[in-house]
Image (cartoon, coloured by chain):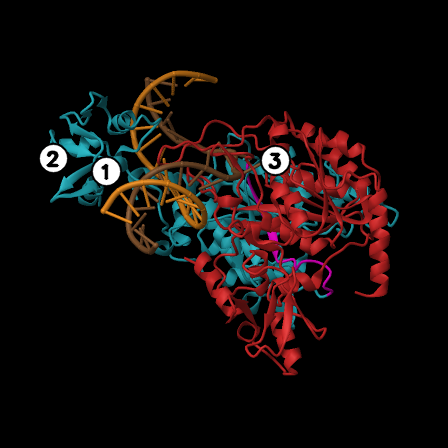
Chain colours: A red, B cyan, C brown, D orange
DNA sequence: CCCAGCTCTGAATCGGCTG
DNA sequence: CCAGCCGATTCAGAGCTGG
């Protein structure tokens, strides 16, 4: 870290200390009213998972006769498209005011609402940078055989305007994807297992999002110390991941039950720790596994020190799946392996080892473990 | 093919012969004006690949048909969006008028325009059935490294209204996908190689779509002989695939160069023969067999005891094709199955089994045997 | 202890025909 | 328009249980 960086960091710490922002806190109340109370140009990112306005009809049963537990909460009900649009434009306008000029917004939705959201985003002057598809590894089937299986959701990523600057950690994303550019289609399982918050065996929130999804977003489009605002906080996935990645967060939520669950969950979250190990699964179907995926899924913890078989070289795993060697080189496992050996190329999977109970094992072993756990 | 089918086909042929539709032809002209000349409720599908960007070369029309000059420099962004919206709503409204009540529309776009298109689709009363993601196997990389690789496009599939019927060949799609339900994310390569139309080494059209994409759409959502309208015909991918699949088509296109290329291409396309066109049928379309018919014809003897797969419930076949369960319930195979399970509904064909040489087989097997023996 | 098999569930705009 | 009946319809993952 250079001198300028240190100065910038210390200035930043001073700013945050005097900040009127409710950092790392959950604000209870209506999202629009609560956003009005926040100062202009004060946060680096808004992540929003607004109501989808599903407009579900009657009951739905599976072929085996069991009942599908649908989203029936009042917060998802709007009388008309016009009412939904008015609500959407109101909170998007507040978000635009609160964002710093170089901040970005992420919104997730399905075909029920995402087109209305996207049009509003454009009308309010935001500039869409990408739309991202979350491909669900295990979506709910279409039980009646009447349509295609609804197997994805859509995210919109936008800056404050056409000429606005923004953060995009291109190298981190490329490293995370095994030295290929990160594409606009991402595969993750839906949120379940240990990660899914339950109370008395019942899910706390009907639409809890997977941590791996937010992890990739924060890693791609924020820097450590950045402030992320989530106006539809729910059970606090954004807060938990932000804490894990060393980002600051602000949550807005109406329902006390969600707030309680979120507070408990975030308190238990440990920065860059293995706490979420069982929770995040991986891209399925791809025979290739990017090294970054192992990090993303907590098979390898950022900060782990890797060495070669003869302990002549060492390097540290970073949060984006890159390595930083003791001699200053950084990049993918292959590139750093080549650099420290002054070789033209290197297979990082077999070159780098981690120590387990005093014994060295190649990181390819971790990949095998991961594949065994995730491949059929 | 049954007698009724033959009658229906011949009626249909007669209708089409008298039809005022320009079947299997390319109409030269502006898409909105050309659509106005087509009769209401006359086509089974509209497939549309409208212009993606907002600079439409001065060919924008308001809903009233008046011309909009979109290239004027002093137009701000709102005006540009408004002009695109007006154009979009105008052609979508015409498409709604031209579609039969059980027809559907497909529109493809990218994040530049698809949100505006989707919102317009909803506002005009269409009912979105799915959004489909075309994952490009070989997308163009993001050369500047400033965003995620834009590796997909989005399609919207919608019926004419919430209660409208529509065609969806569920079994064909499931068969095409190795006996798993077809999902909402489809992977195809971009159009290239032999398929890509070129003239003097230069591609004829900048956004020619892969035939495989249209093939899947027509196979999923139309029947042989159905009429498909493409108001942005370009180089005629829709026409070539429709001809190949035994569907009728109408294309609208402004540019003579595209029309020439499309006409040549479609003339060279070879229709699949009828045996290749046969697709997986849904049991819904198969001839119905009442359970009582099996008893009447001695495929099942009155007094036979049926059980469920786990032998938890049992019932006796009566002479009139009704069942009498051990617990006193009686009625149709479906009703008794539902009653003994205390379920809202039940498919008796798969629920009830009979024992043959100590092995249980569903009574649907008996129905299959009967159908094989009695159908030509 | 392990494995095979069974159960449960997830942001879902999820019939058609007859009387 | 509504009630009632007919009968078609599911994938992957996690967790539990019994052998």
Which residue corresponds to mark 2? Answer: B298
The question of residue A89 being in magenta is answered with no
Q: Which mark is residue A85?
A: none
Q: Is disc 1 surrounded by few (<14), some (14 to 19) or many (20+) residues within 10 Å?
A: few
Q: Chain of mark 2?
A: B
Q: Chain of mark 3?
A: A
Mark 3 residue element: loop
Mark 1 residue element: loop
Q: Is residue A135 visible?
A: yes
| Viewer-side residue, B306 vs B219 | B306
Residue B349 in the image: state x and y as whole percent.
26, 36
Residue at 11% of width from left, 33% of height from top? B301
Q: CA distance from mark 1 to mark 2?
A: 26 Å
- Disc 3 with disc 2 on a shared chain: no
On the rendered image, what quadrant is the C terminus of chain A found in?
A: bottom left
Q: Is residue B351 above or below residue A220?
A: above
Q: Is residue A126 above or below residue A59?
A: below
Which of the two labelled residues, at mark 1 and mark 2, occupies the earlier sequence position? 2
Q: Which mark is residue A52?
A: 3
Which residue corresponds to mark 1? Answer: B310
* 3 or 2: mark nearer the eye: 3
Q: Is residue B32 visible?
A: no
Residue at 19% of width from left, 25% of height from top? B325
- Disc 1 with disc 2 on a shared chain: yes
Residue at 20% of width from left, 22% of height from top? B327
Residue at 64% of width from left, 45% of height from top? A240
Q: Is disc 3 surrounded by few (<14), some (14 to 19) or many (20+) residues within 10 Å?
A: many
The question of residue B149 being in magenta is answered with yes
Mark 1–mark 2 contact, CB under 8 Å?
Answer: no
The region drawn magenta spans B144-159
Q: Is residue B200 above or below residue A148?
A: below
């Amino acid at each position: 870290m250079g001198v300028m960086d240190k100065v910038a960091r210390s200035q930043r710490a001073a700013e945050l200390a005097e900040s009127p922002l409710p950092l790392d806190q959950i604000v209870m109340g209506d999202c629009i009213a609560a956003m009005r109370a926040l100062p202009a140009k004060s946060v680096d990112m808004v992540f929003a998972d607004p109501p989808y306005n599903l407009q579900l009809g009657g009951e739905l049963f599976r072929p085996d006769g069991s009942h599908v537990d649908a989203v029936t909460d009042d917060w998802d009900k709007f009388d008309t498209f016009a009412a939904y649009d008015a609500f959407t434009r109101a909170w998007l306008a507040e978000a635009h005011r609160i964002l710093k000029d170089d901040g970005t917004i992420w919104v997730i939705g399905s075909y029920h609402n995402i087109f209305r959201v996207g049009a509003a985003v454009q009308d309010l002057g935001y500039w869409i940078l990408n739309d991202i598809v979350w491909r669900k590894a295990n979506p709910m089937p279409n039980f009646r055989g009447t349509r295609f299986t609804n197997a994805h959701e859509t995210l919109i990523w936008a800056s404050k305007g056409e000429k606005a600057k923004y953060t995009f950690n291109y190298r981190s994303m490329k490293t995370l994807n095994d030295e290929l550019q990160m594409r606009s289609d991402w595969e993750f399982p839906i949120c379940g297992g240990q990660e899914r918050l339950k109370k008395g065996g019942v899910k706390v929130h009907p639409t809890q999002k997977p941590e791996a999804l937010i992890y990739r977003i924060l890693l791609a489009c924020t820097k450590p110390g950045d402030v992320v605002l989530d106006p539809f906080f729910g059970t606090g996935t954004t807060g938990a991941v932000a804490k894990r990645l060393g980002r600051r967060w602000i949550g807005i939520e109406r329902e006390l039950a969600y707030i309680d669950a979120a507070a408990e969950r975030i308190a238990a979250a440990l920065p860059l720790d293995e706490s979420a190990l069982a929770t995040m699964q991986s891209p399925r179907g791809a025979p290739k596994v990017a090294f970054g995926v192992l990090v993303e899924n907590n098979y390898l913890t950022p900060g782990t020190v890797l060495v070669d078989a003869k302990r002549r070289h060492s390097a540290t795993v970073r949060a984006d799946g890159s390595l930083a060697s003791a001699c200053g080189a950084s990049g993918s496992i292959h590139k750093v392996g080549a650099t420290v050996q002054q070789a033209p190329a290197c297979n990082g999977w077999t070159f780098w080892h981690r120590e387990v109970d005093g014994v060295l094992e190649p990181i390819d072993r971790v990949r095998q473990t991961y594949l065994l756990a995730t491949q059929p």
